[in-house]
Image: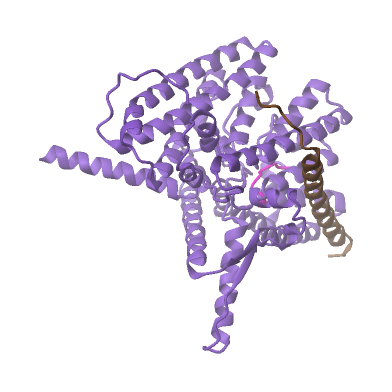
Amino acid sequence: MKRLKLDFHQIFKDAAGYTAELGWMVLYTLALFLLTWLISVIPW
Amino acid sequence: MADFGDSMVKPVKHPNLGIVFYYTGYIVIGMSLFMLLPALASALFREWNVVLGFGIALMSSLSIGMSMVLIGRNTRLNKGKLMWKHGFVVASLSWFILMFLCAIPYMLSGHMNSLLDATFDVMSGFTTTGVFLLQDLDHVSVGLNLWRHMLTFIGGQGMVVLALSFLVREMAGAYKFYVGEGKDVTLVPNVRGTTQIIWIISMVYLTIGTFILFINGILIGLNPTNAFLHGLYIFMAGWSTGGFAPNLQNIMYYHSFSYEVVSILFFVLGSMNFGLHYAIIKGKKMEFLKNIEMQSFILSSFVASAIASVALAKSGLYTDAISLFRRVVFNIVSANTTTGFGSVFARQFILEWGPLGMMAITIVMLIGGSACSTAGGFKGLRVGIVVKGFFADMRKLLSSERRVKVEKYHHIKDMILDDAIVRSAGTIILLYIVLFTGATLLGAYYGYPVVDSMFEAASVSGNVGLSVGITATTMPSAMKVYYIIAMYMGRLEFLSVFALIGVMAQGVKSWFKKSSV
């Protein structure tokens, strides 16, 4: 039977990748909110 | 490979039909087995009638799937060679057959007014659209709710290759099925590996997303069971850019800014190309900004959000940043990613958004998310290629005739922008516009205002799911049928459906020839 081997180095690298992607999403959402805030403070 | 014994069934005369039946049968079996999950969930919640409904659906689908495999088996094993047209026809035919089979639990639930309505909802799920004709949504069983969200989740990832990867050992030529289902990025050299990576990424995010939404649900006062189920449903609907929700009020049910923000994170992630996910996860972090699709998406979502926000701020309807973000930007991003979560009621789009806001949201619905993702629409990649192609032509026109410059665009790696790529992207965009125009005209023919009709047409042909209220069980049957076709064609990106129609037309033609001899 094949033994399941966990490659922790790879797991940590992938975890960093997923975190980076989520980070981009947070930045994108924050930038959108900043845009909305700017529009809300301008007296149209 | 699942073995059904040495078939006594004679090979069908037409080899094409045999091959198509063989693979379609396996896909039907694969999807039927997924019915076990909602059946188990229903049993856990003691919804015995629902368990029975799924049991009937499972048995019927398995019988049909196995019969198809048996009919096609000998042809496939003896002389059948898998060709491109088979891949396209199998993808479109299996979606068509499954539209009916997956509708059985809907019909038996008592929540549907007709079979047409049930198939409409299934196609909306498969294509990750999100419009629905189901009645009394707030009182749907756990089993059926799970099934609705599973359909959209599985449909988004690609059910054809998934089913075949698990059930068929010999997968030579699998790329043909993969392309047939509207996907084209290969993350590793073989399709089975690519499918595995797509599913691993989705399952990792399913775990993260459901957990975050579960915690958020607890914090806003849902009981633990509901917090988990709603978290699971909303994640599945968000990640697949489907836009279904377990309640009629959609995302407004939660009255929570944080729930809306978390769902934005996951539906934007869901609308991203799996090739881009893989690149970022494997360490190419800056790919997010360099990629032509993301540049196109960021530009369209920011410009449309700005236009709609200015229009609504000017009208005095939403004046503070939080309301503008929750009621305007949320809907624009939801539309641009073709998710279809709505944070305002359907009629508010017509009564409050005004023509500028409506146009902004309609345009981003048509543009859509990324290619090889769960999103629909033209796709950012094609828009980016066509825009870049236009500027390249302009540069060519203005520069010296002797100067030859190779134009490039960046999508995971630098690629050469040749005329064939621009033409192919332009053709698909044109086909989407034809589909959208047809839906708009049909709506106008039945007496709906043109702007409303355009909004709904963009929503179904771009697989979005936002609605101004036209999609209802009372709408004319012809519109329901056209909307089903629009969702189906929009999702499979035309080629597969045209291949199915072509093969059927060939069959009818040869039948007429034989009968006239």
**Residue drawn at (58%, 45%) of the image:** B463
Give the letter of the brown chain: A
Residue B307 against residue A3 in the figure, above or below: below
Q: Is residue B140 magenta?
A: no
Kindly indicate the quadrant of the structure image that contains residue B367.
Answer: bottom right
Magenta-drawn segment? B336-343
Q: Could you tell whether B92 is left or right of A27 in the image?
A: left
Instruction: Inspect this view and state whether residue B128 appears.
Output: no
Q: Residue B435 in the image: state x and y as whole percent.
A: 48, 52
Residue B485 seen in the current view = yes
- From the image, give the main secondary structure of the stretch colored magenta: loop
Question: Is B46 situated above or below B440?
Answer: above
At which x and y percent is residue B190?
A: 55, 44
Toward the viewer: B361 or B375? B375
Task: Tell whether B413 sits left or right of B396.
Answer: right
Residue drawn 56% across and 73% down? B390
Q: x, y (%) of residue A5? A: 74, 31
Q: Position of residue B377 (x, y in %)?
A: 58, 52
Q: Would you place residue B45 above or below residue B231 in this image?
A: above
Name which residue lies at 70% across and 35% down. Answer: B203
Q: Indicate left or right for B392 with B246 as reference.
A: left
Q: Nearer the viewer, residue B311 or B407?
A: B407
User: Chain B appears in which tint?
Assistant: purple
